[in-house]
Amino acid sequence: MKHQSLFELKRKLFHILGGILGIFLIQFNLINTRIIFSVLVFGIILSIICLKHRVPIISSFLDTFGRKEEQEHLPGRALIFAAAGVLLCLQLFEKNIALASLIILTFSDSTSLLVGKYLGKTKTILNKEKNIEGTIAGVLVSTSLASFFVPFYLAFIGSLAAGFFELLTIRVQELKVDDNLIIPLSAGTIMFLVQMFLI
């Protein structure tokens, strides 16, 4: 149990650091959608290769940060879905909404898991694995950080939408859609719609 907690903590810290780095690179135009698309395609190819063969450095990295069930079906699944989420946000939304969505992706899930794990007591109705305290913390932290890119009310609405959709399990046939795709797209879509039609 302690080993599992340490493993999840490492994953979430990597998630936060990777998210911050990605946002920085996008904000200062050091990477663009072509580079992200190339990373996505390369990641999918590497994942397929890693299903059958050990790839130096990559396989060790996946052993350190990947969940066992992911390694058996799609190694690096979280990174692939994160790259897809980033790419779609940048294509679908104006830059400020895209960056706010990526801030929400970076901090909402990680904060809700960490706060929920150590301070949470009240399970949510929609997902018995998550709790209300973690979800509220995720919404508050991601709102405060996303408001660097969009007005506070948009950041709050986007974070609230992401927190809600994070509680749902969405499947396409037998494949569970990763929250690294659901969170930024739900946050970005809600912020876009509110800005477009209600303001």
Image (spheres, rainbow, N blue to C red):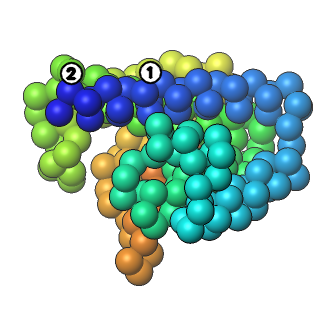
- Does residue 17 appear left or right of residue 33 in this picture? left
In the rendered image, which quarter contains the N terminus?
A: top left
Residue 151 in sight here: no
- Does residue 152 appear left or right of residue 109 in this picture? right
Q: Position of residue 78 (x, y in %)?
A: 52, 50
Q: Quadrant of residue 191?
A: top right
Q: Is residue 26 above or below residue 83?
A: above
Helix, strand or loop under label 1: helix
Q: Position of residue 55 (x, y in %)?
A: 64, 52
Lower sequence index among marks 2 and 1: 2
Q: Position of residue 15 (x, y in %)?
A: 52, 32
Q: Between residues 2 and 77, which one lies in front from this camera angle?
A: 2
Q: Identify residue type, mark 2.
A: Tyr
Give the labeled residue for mark 2.
118
Q: Quadrant of residue 92?
A: bottom right
Residue 164 in sight here: yes
Give the labeled residue for mark 1.
141
CB under 8 Å between discs 2 and 1: no
| Residue density around tag 1, few if under 14, some if 14–19, many if 20 or more, within 10 Å | some
Q: Position of residue 121 (x, y in %)?
A: 11, 28
Q: Between residues 93 and 44, which one lies in front from this camera angle?
A: 44
Q: Say which residue appears at 19% left-offset and 20% top-offset.
A: 119
Helix, strand or loop under label 2: helix
Task: Check residue 49 in the rendering and tell me which mark sits there, or answer none.
Answer: none
Q: Say which residue appears at 51% left-offset and 19% top-offset.
A: 144
Q: Between residues 3 and 56, which one lies in front from this camera angle?
A: 56
Q: What whole-number distance in Å separates the C-alpha atoms at marks 2 and 1?
A: 16 Å
Q: Identify residue type, mark 1.
A: Val
